[in-house]
Image (cartoon, helix red, strand yellow):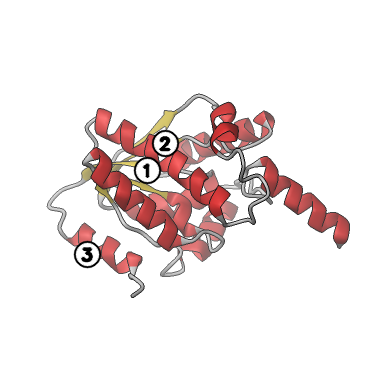
Amino acid sequence: MNQNYHLLCLEEIKKLDKPKKILLHSCCAPCSSYVITFLSNYFDITVLYYNPNISPYEEYEKRKKEQIKLIKNLKTKNKLDFLDCDYDNELYNKVVTGFEEAPEGGSRCHICFNLRLEKTAILAKENNYEYFSSTLTVSPHKNSKVINEIGFNLSKKYNIKWLYSDFKKNEGFKQSIELSKKYNLYRQNYCGCIYSKKRLEKQEITN
Protein backbone atom coordinates (compact mmCIF):
# COMPACT_ATOMS: atom_id res chain seq x y z
CA MET A 1 0.00 0.00 0.00
CA ASN A 2 1.34 3.42 -0.95
CA GLN A 3 1.94 5.83 1.91
CA ASN A 4 0.78 9.44 1.83
CA TYR A 5 4.09 11.01 2.84
CA HIS A 6 2.66 14.52 2.76
CA LEU A 7 0.04 13.50 5.30
CA LEU A 8 2.69 11.82 7.47
CA CYS A 9 4.64 15.08 7.42
CA LEU A 10 1.62 17.09 8.53
CA GLU A 11 0.85 14.58 11.28
CA GLU A 12 4.40 14.88 12.62
CA ILE A 13 4.22 18.66 12.55
CA LYS A 14 1.01 18.56 14.62
CA LYS A 15 2.97 16.85 17.41
CA LEU A 16 5.39 19.75 17.79
CA ASP A 17 4.92 21.91 20.88
CA LYS A 18 7.69 24.33 19.84
CA PRO A 19 10.08 24.77 16.90
CA LYS A 20 12.46 21.81 16.57
CA LYS A 21 15.91 21.78 14.99
CA ILE A 22 16.00 20.18 11.56
CA LEU A 23 18.93 19.63 9.22
CA LEU A 24 17.47 20.00 5.75
CA HIS A 25 19.47 18.63 2.85
CA SER A 26 18.98 20.89 -0.16
CA CYS A 27 19.66 19.86 -3.74
CA CYS A 28 19.37 23.44 -5.05
CA ALA A 29 17.95 26.87 -4.28
CA PRO A 30 14.82 26.60 -6.48
CA CYS A 31 13.70 23.33 -4.91
CA SER A 32 14.47 24.58 -1.41
CA SER A 33 12.55 27.84 -1.81
CA TYR A 34 9.11 26.40 -1.12
CA VAL A 35 10.33 23.77 1.34
CA ILE A 36 12.09 26.33 3.53
CA THR A 37 9.11 28.67 3.37
CA PHE A 38 6.79 25.87 4.48
CA LEU A 39 8.96 24.21 7.14
CA SER A 40 10.21 27.44 8.69
CA ASN A 41 6.79 27.89 10.28
CA TYR A 42 7.47 24.86 12.45
CA PHE A 43 11.25 24.30 12.59
CA ASP A 44 14.55 26.02 13.17
CA ILE A 45 16.17 25.08 9.86
CA THR A 46 19.78 24.58 8.91
CA VAL A 47 20.12 24.08 5.18
CA LEU A 48 22.82 21.54 4.32
CA TYR A 49 24.38 21.91 0.90
CA TYR A 50 25.92 18.50 0.24
CA ASN A 51 25.75 17.57 -3.44
CA PRO A 52 28.91 15.77 -4.58
CA ASN A 53 27.02 14.50 -7.63
CA ILE A 54 26.98 17.91 -9.31
CA SER A 55 29.34 18.29 -12.23
CA PRO A 56 31.28 20.22 -13.40
CA TYR A 57 32.67 22.10 -10.40
CA GLU A 58 31.68 25.47 -11.88
CA GLU A 59 28.06 24.30 -11.94
CA TYR A 60 28.36 23.16 -8.32
CA GLU A 61 29.65 26.58 -7.25
CA LYS A 62 26.97 28.39 -9.22
CA ARG A 63 24.19 26.42 -7.56
CA LYS A 64 25.71 26.88 -4.11
CA LYS A 65 25.89 30.66 -4.56
CA GLU A 66 22.22 30.68 -5.52
CA GLN A 67 21.41 28.71 -2.37
CA ILE A 68 23.25 31.20 -0.18
CA LYS A 69 21.57 34.12 -1.97
CA LEU A 70 18.14 32.65 -1.30
CA ILE A 71 18.83 32.09 2.39
CA LYS A 72 20.02 35.68 2.79
CA ASN A 73 16.88 37.04 1.14
CA LEU A 74 14.20 34.82 2.68
CA LYS A 75 12.26 36.15 5.65
CA THR A 76 11.32 33.25 7.93
CA LYS A 77 9.35 32.89 11.13
CA ASN A 78 12.02 30.79 12.83
CA LYS A 79 15.80 30.48 12.59
CA LEU A 80 17.41 29.77 9.23
CA ASP A 81 21.10 28.86 8.91
CA PHE A 82 23.40 27.38 6.29
CA LEU A 83 25.89 24.50 6.51
CA ASP A 84 28.31 23.94 3.67
CA CYS A 85 30.28 20.80 2.82
CA ASP A 86 33.37 20.15 0.76
CA TYR A 87 32.94 19.24 -2.89
CA ASP A 88 33.43 15.46 -2.95
CA ASN A 89 32.81 14.48 -6.55
CA GLU A 90 35.44 11.71 -6.35
CA LEU A 91 33.38 9.93 -3.69
CA TYR A 92 30.25 10.22 -5.80
CA ASN A 93 32.04 8.76 -8.83
CA LYS A 94 33.33 5.92 -6.67
CA VAL A 95 29.94 4.89 -5.24
CA VAL A 96 28.18 4.92 -8.63
CA THR A 97 30.90 2.92 -10.39
CA GLY A 98 29.21 0.14 -12.34
CA PHE A 99 25.94 2.07 -12.56
CA GLU A 100 27.01 4.70 -15.07
CA GLU A 101 24.56 3.47 -17.72
CA ALA A 102 21.61 3.07 -15.38
CA PRO A 103 18.52 4.97 -16.53
CA GLU A 104 17.66 8.32 -15.02
CA GLY A 105 15.72 7.73 -11.83
CA GLY A 106 17.08 4.18 -11.48
CA SER A 107 19.68 2.51 -9.30
CA ARG A 108 22.38 5.14 -9.84
CA CYS A 109 20.03 7.83 -8.58
CA HIS A 110 19.04 5.72 -5.58
CA ILE A 111 22.72 5.38 -4.64
CA CYS A 112 23.10 9.14 -5.00
CA PHE A 113 20.09 9.79 -2.75
CA ASN A 114 21.53 7.48 -0.12
CA LEU A 115 24.96 9.13 -0.27
CA ARG A 116 23.55 12.60 0.33
CA LEU A 117 20.96 11.61 2.90
CA GLU A 118 23.41 9.50 4.90
CA LYS A 119 25.75 12.49 5.18
CA THR A 120 22.78 14.54 6.36
CA ALA A 121 21.80 11.94 8.97
CA ILE A 122 25.37 11.69 10.29
CA LEU A 123 25.79 15.46 10.61
CA ALA A 124 22.35 15.84 12.15
CA LYS A 125 23.17 13.23 14.79
CA GLU A 126 26.62 14.66 15.51
CA ASN A 127 25.27 18.19 15.91
CA ASN A 128 22.20 17.37 18.02
CA TYR A 129 19.48 18.09 15.51
CA GLU A 130 16.12 16.54 16.26
CA TYR A 131 15.16 15.82 12.64
CA PHE A 132 16.66 15.50 9.19
CA SER A 133 14.97 15.69 5.81
CA SER A 134 15.53 16.68 2.18
CA THR A 135 14.12 19.00 -0.45
CA LEU A 136 14.41 16.23 -3.05
CA THR A 137 10.75 15.25 -2.80
CA VAL A 138 9.57 18.60 -4.16
CA SER A 139 10.62 17.55 -7.67
CA PRO A 140 8.09 15.71 -9.83
CA HIS A 141 11.08 13.90 -11.36
CA LYS A 142 12.12 12.31 -8.05
CA ASN A 143 10.54 9.19 -6.53
CA SER A 144 9.26 10.22 -3.10
CA LYS A 145 8.71 6.61 -2.04
CA VAL A 146 12.36 5.74 -2.65
CA ILE A 147 13.62 8.89 -0.92
CA ASN A 148 11.43 8.37 2.14
CA GLU A 149 12.37 4.71 2.45
CA ILE A 150 16.06 5.65 2.36
CA GLY A 151 15.47 8.38 4.94
CA PHE A 152 13.55 6.03 7.23
CA ASN A 153 16.26 3.35 7.06
CA LEU A 154 18.94 5.91 7.86
CA SER A 155 16.86 7.23 10.77
CA LYS A 156 16.94 3.76 12.32
CA LYS A 157 20.66 3.34 11.59
CA TYR A 158 21.65 6.63 13.23
CA ASN A 159 18.81 6.96 15.74
CA ILE A 160 17.54 10.33 14.57
CA LYS A 161 14.08 11.31 13.35
CA TRP A 162 13.41 11.46 9.62
CA LEU A 163 10.72 13.92 8.57
CA TYR A 164 8.67 12.19 5.91
CA SER A 165 7.72 14.42 3.01
CA ASP A 166 6.27 14.74 -0.43
CA PHE A 167 6.82 18.46 -0.82
CA LYS A 168 5.48 18.52 -4.37
CA LYS A 169 1.99 17.99 -2.93
CA ASN A 170 -0.31 20.90 -2.19
CA GLU A 171 1.17 22.69 -5.24
CA GLY A 172 4.61 22.67 -3.62
CA PHE A 173 6.45 22.33 -6.92
CA LYS A 174 4.33 25.06 -8.50
CA GLN A 175 5.07 27.36 -5.58
CA SER A 176 8.79 26.62 -5.89
CA ILE A 177 8.66 27.86 -9.50
CA GLU A 178 6.87 31.04 -8.44
CA LEU A 179 9.35 31.67 -5.61
CA SER A 180 12.26 31.06 -7.99
CA LYS A 181 10.91 33.83 -10.20
CA LYS A 182 10.35 36.12 -7.22
CA TYR A 183 13.93 35.75 -6.01
CA ASN A 184 15.40 35.57 -9.51
CA LEU A 185 16.97 32.16 -8.95
CA TYR A 186 18.97 30.23 -11.51
CA ARG A 187 16.99 27.12 -12.49
CA GLN A 188 19.27 24.44 -13.91
CA ASN A 189 18.15 22.29 -16.84
CA TYR A 190 19.66 19.01 -15.62
CA CYS A 191 19.65 17.22 -12.28
CA GLY A 192 23.32 17.64 -11.54
CA CYS A 193 25.52 14.66 -12.36
CA ILE A 194 27.56 14.23 -15.52
CA TYR A 195 25.25 11.42 -16.64
CA SER A 196 22.13 13.56 -16.52
CA LYS A 197 24.03 16.30 -18.34
CA LYS A 198 25.06 13.89 -21.11
CA ARG A 199 21.48 12.67 -21.36
CA LEU A 200 20.25 16.22 -21.83
CA GLU A 201 22.89 16.96 -24.46
CA LYS A 202 21.96 13.78 -26.32
CA GLN A 203 18.28 14.76 -26.32
CA GLU A 204 19.13 18.22 -27.64
CA ILE A 205 21.12 16.71 -30.51
CA THR A 206 18.29 14.27 -31.31
CA ASN A 207 15.71 17.04 -31.29
- What is the number of callouts on the image? 3
Q: Please, which residue is most extreme toward the bottom here?
A: 1
Is residue 40 visible in this depiction of the protein? no
* Residue drawn at the location 21% of the way across and 59% of the way down: 12
The N terminus sits in image quarter:
bottom left
Question: Is 3 located above or below residue 142 in the figure?
Answer: below
- As measured in the structure, the alpha-carbon distance from the residue carrying label 2 to the one carrying label 1 is 6 Å
The x and y percentages for residue 54 are 61, 38
Q: Secondary structure at mark 2?
A: strand
Is residue 174 visible in this depiction of the protein? yes
Q: Which mark is first along the chain, 3 or 2? A: 3
* Residue drawn at the location 61% of the way across and 34% of the way down: 60
Other residues around mark 1 within 10 Å, as few (<14) / some (14–19) / many (≥20): many
The x and y percentages for residue 38 are 36, 56
Q: Amino acid at mark 2?
A: Leu
Decide: marks 2, 1 in contact (CB < 8 A)?
yes
Question: Is 35 located above or below residue 73 in the figure?
Answer: below
Please tell me the numbered disc located at residue 24. Answer: 1
Q: Amino acid at mark 1?
A: Leu
Question: Is 60 located above or below residue 156 in the figure?
Answer: above
> On the image, numbered disc 2 is attached to which residue?
48
Query: Which of the pair 163/30 is nearer the observer?
Result: 163
| Quarter residue 6 falls in | bottom left
> On the image, numbered disc 3 is attached to which residue?
11
Other residues around mark 3 within 10 Å, as few (<14) / some (14–19) / many (≥20): few
- As measured in the structure, the alpha-carbon distance from the residue carrying label 2 to the one carrying label 3 is 24 Å
Q: Amino acid at mark 3?
A: Glu
* Residue drawn at the location 18% of the way across and 61% of the way down: 14
Q: Secondary structure at mark 1?
A: strand
Q: Which mark is first along the chain, 3 or 1? A: 3
